[in-house]
Image (cartoon, grey):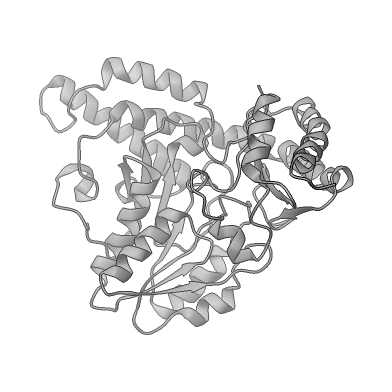
Amino acid sequence: MPYFDAASTEPLHPAARSALLAAYETGWADPARLYGSGRRARMLLDEARARVAASLGVRPDELSFTTSGTQAVHLAVLGALAARRRAGRHLVVGAVEHSSVLHAAELHEREGGTVTAVPVDLHGRVDPAEFAAALRHDTALACLQSANHEVGTVQPVEEVAEACRAAGVPLFTDAAQSAGRMPLPAGWSLLAASAHKFGGPPGTGLLVVRKGTRWRSPLPADEREGGRVPGFPGVPAALATAAALEAHTAEFAADAPRLRELVDRIRARLPELVADVEIVGDPVRRLPHLVTFSFLYVEGEAIITELDRLGFEVSSGSSCTADTLRPSHVLEAMGVITHGNVRVSLPRGATTADVDRFLAVLPDTVSRLRKSAGVT
């Protein structure tokens, strides 16, 4: 069954599986202990941290392992806001940020802070000038994702980072969709990523706080992970994360042109095969493996169910909101069709034959669903 939902989670990479199983034999002990097995676990945790840091281009002491990408986002946003409370209580976010960022912003508002959401264009991209204009003297933090999780549009992080630097405002970047798939942009102060997005183990996130960035934990004090992340560290998961990030980065760099061609094929063929379809997201400045499109007169959930019956696993809307009845906030902010939405994100190993078969069954699927809804 072709799996086309890598933006939700990439299948566990074989390198991660091997590292995970091996580490369960050698890295199970408490790395804070001074006896032999504890020292060995500490060495393995330090090794994992150094390898992930090297892959991301950061210092090992700037990196912490968290229990998820969502936790990394919450710690980054709320920790930066807590540390810069004297500077002000204003937060700037892009309108199409991941829900974890927006939920942190909602909490900030409930606690008396203010939030400005910078709008996006029809492709889901913020205007750097508009983002810069939203910065104020009391802005404590700005947030801009590296690439959008629903439509794949790459954001102008470096241009926004330049404006933030000029204003003395730290920039947080959610890199969950781009880590392991494209070079990280420059200029950010805090960053979050999620291991399972690049073939690592679920339940492991990455938090980076650059040197010189003010940050204070919004949680009760804990000695683990340099005081940034509470709880017992998962050494095997950290090693598996390092193995996955290294392997996926190398493989994706080589395979990205092929995946981009497959996505370009979907983008070009769909309007020819199906009437009343809207392909969304930036056609050029985008993740190479992801394409999103919306059909008039049919519900996205119905398409997903029917495609699953035919052997294709795709998603509708965001993985974090697909189980709700609310329209996608990303598509709403873009001003495009919010229903009948399908997101295809190709994992490693996706083939031309899989894509061609998908294009062969999709038109009839949409036609049958429209007829059942009384649309001819």
- List x then y, in percent, for residue 30: 17, 28
The residue nearer to you, when weighing 44 against 347, is 347
Q: Residue at x 29, y 79 (%)?
A: 88
Q: Residue lying furthest right in this view?
A: 272
Residue 270 seen anywhere in this rendered image of the structure: yes
**Taking 52 as reference, is 372 left or right?**
right
Looking at the image, which residue is at 46% across and 46% down?
56
Decide which of 89, 65 is in the foreground and name it: 89
Give the vertical position of 288 relative to 361 (above or below): below
Whether residue 292 sits left or right of residue 371 in the image: it is left
Residue at 44% x, 62% y: name it.
188
Q: Is residue 352 above or below residue 103?
A: above
Direction from residue 108 to residue 372 in the image, left or right: right
Quadrant of residue 345 within the rendered picture: top right
Percent position of residue 116, x then y: 44, 75
Which quarter shows the N terminus?
top right
Can residue 213 be seen here? The reply is no
